[in-house]
Image (spheres, helix red, strand yellow):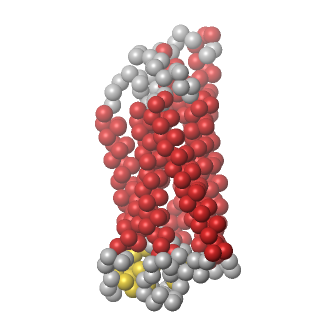
Amino acid sequence: MNLLFGNSTDFWVPSYVLNDNSYITWMNLPLFLLFFLSILISILFVINAMNVIHKIRKLHDNATWIVLSILAAWFEGLIGMLMIFPYKFGFCTLGDPSRIFYGFESDEFLPINISWKSAPLLIGSILIWHYLGLLNGGIICFVIERSLATLLSRDYESTPRQWLSISLHILHHLIAIVMCIFFCFHILPLKILICFNAFGFAFQIPYVFFLRHYNTSKRSEMRLAENITNHSLAAKFQTEENVRSMHIATRLSIVVGVFDVLFLIVIILATCQVPGAQLFFQESDILDTWYNVKCRRMEEQIHAVLPINATSNRPES
């Protein structure tokens, strides 16, 4: 949905519909209850996943903090979604209260002024766009970090590289800020953004599988009798960590990829004005809150491959 400040500033709100109060009925009360129940369950899942990852600390600190930052960013997206929620369902209205505004990229802008009435919508939009930037940036930084861990496996654990940690944090937040600006001010049209998203996943998923195959092959080579003394304990440990982390990354990539493809299909159908798109997007917030499915998946995989009682066996060399 596009908002217009003054005569020139285009602001993009991450909502397909605004001012639609047709769902405020007793018949839809179970739907709203399900929405808030899914939020509570999601909060518990995400907090539990963060707690498990922080306590285990089996991965390298760089990878651990990247994953934790991705999970923590979910709360930013949740706050933004809750701030936009009243405007979607007509509890708070902008412009003509009797008119429903819908569409991702509408030719009819909703002109508004910056005021206390519109501030929650604007702040919530910024939070959601920034959260999407943190999510995508976190995935990129995690893949980069695991690539460097593979490349520097001989001394990645034993040699401190503060420049690497700082660079990853800067890159993560830089990606988030740039994406937030691009989305908020609608610098690129939706079709181009969809293409970027599709190309990104088309590159990322095969690359994750490549890293997994490379580290698995390297581990098998190290276990051969003739090579067992040719590698340091630190290199063997790092390779094992890379294999475990890439198993997690592979499963997460599949889950995220499935969700991403489904939402891309829905967005494309909505931009083509397919009948029923408005109904779907008014109820899609329930699906959005189930991002915890991916978080829960991460937690389950960590439970499966990283035992809690093996948290202090990192080799020094």
Q: Residue at x 47, y 37 (%)?
A: 51
Report the side of 66 relative to 194 (left or right). left
Q: Residue at x 41, y 36 (%)?
A: 62
| Quarter of the figure with residue 211 | top right
| Quarter of the figure with residue 248 | top right
Report the side of 64 relative to 218 (left or right). left
Out of 225 and 125, give the one closest to the viewer.
125
Q: Residue 12 placed where, x, y %?
A: 43, 74
In this view of the protein, can residue 212 be seen by the observer?
A: no
Give the answer, above or below, for where 29 lies relative to 199.
below
Give the answer, above or below, for where 289 lies relative to 212.
below
| Viewport quadrant of the C terminus | top left
Out of 280 and 230, give the one closest to the viewer.
280
Q: Residue 52 placed where, x, y %?
A: 50, 35
Q: Residue at x 58, y 18 (%)?
A: 222
Out of 228 and 64, give the one closest to the viewer.
64
Give the answer, above or below, for where 269 lies relative to 176.
below
In this view of the protein, can residue 171 be seen by the observer?
A: yes
Report the side of 214 relative to 109 (left or right). right
Q: Residue at x 37, y 77 (%)?
A: 118
Q: Residue furthest front?
A: 26
